[in-house]
Image: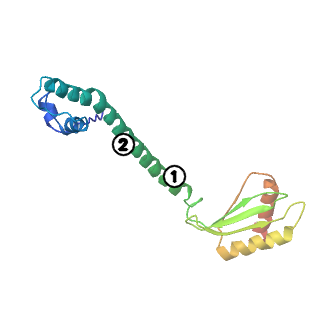
Amino acid sequence: MLSLELIPDAQVLKDAKAVNFAQTAIARHANIQHQGRAADDWLQTVVLWTWRVKLHGFFETELFAKLREASESQAIDVFANNLRDLLMAAPAGDFTTMGLDPGLRTGTKAVILDSTGKLLKYFTIFPHAPQKQWQQSLKKLAEACESYQVKLISIGNGTASRETDNLINELKKRTA
């Protein structure tokens, strides 16, 4: 278990009545000086207790809260960078991949990613109802596959996914 403590200087550990920088600053702020008066020792004790009982704990808590916040922020940044690298990795290994998001009314969205996951091209085709541009869609897909040497095709499982699977099966028959 890691334990931390705020210690202004080494004298605090040796002598319970030792004056440290923090106590000197408190005395200076309150204009308290040892001038040989009867209450001067009592005032020095008040300064000591002000530091030890009130301010030391407050400053220690504030300092460690800021350190904890900074370390949590840095940990989140490291996690985010690692996650970004993981999510942006090539989706299917070392292959150029076409991803299809099937749709009827809005069309089927297509993206082509290279082996590193970099976006190469995106476009929309409308092979299904209501547009029914089956042949034009096949031609556009075939051209894209040939231009970018697509090795894998991934189809989302949304609306019109079965119909899009039929489209890709026909594309495979034509290009085989």
Identity, as a three-letter code, of the amino acid under mark 2: Leu
Image x and y of residue 38, in percent:
12, 23
Q: Quadrant of residue 173?
A: bottom right
Q: Quadrant of the N terminus?
A: top left
143 is higher (above) or lower (below) than 53: below
Q: Quadrant of residue 156?
A: bottom right
Q: Residue at x 15, y 37 (%)?
A: 10
Mark 1 sits on what residue? 83
Image x and y of residue 172, in percent:
75, 67
Left or right: 121 as drawn, with respect to 82: right
Image x and y of residue 71, in percent:
39, 45
Q: Residue at x 75, y 62 (%)?
A: 109
Mark 2 sits on what residue? 67
Q: Residue at x 77, y 72 (%)?
A: 140
What secondary structure is marked by label 1? helix
68 is higher (above) or lower (below) than 14: below
Assess whether mark 1 and mark 2 are in contact (beta carbons under 8 angstroms).
no
Alpha carbon of mark 2 to alpha carbon of mark 1: how far?
24 Å
What secondary structure is marked by label 2? helix
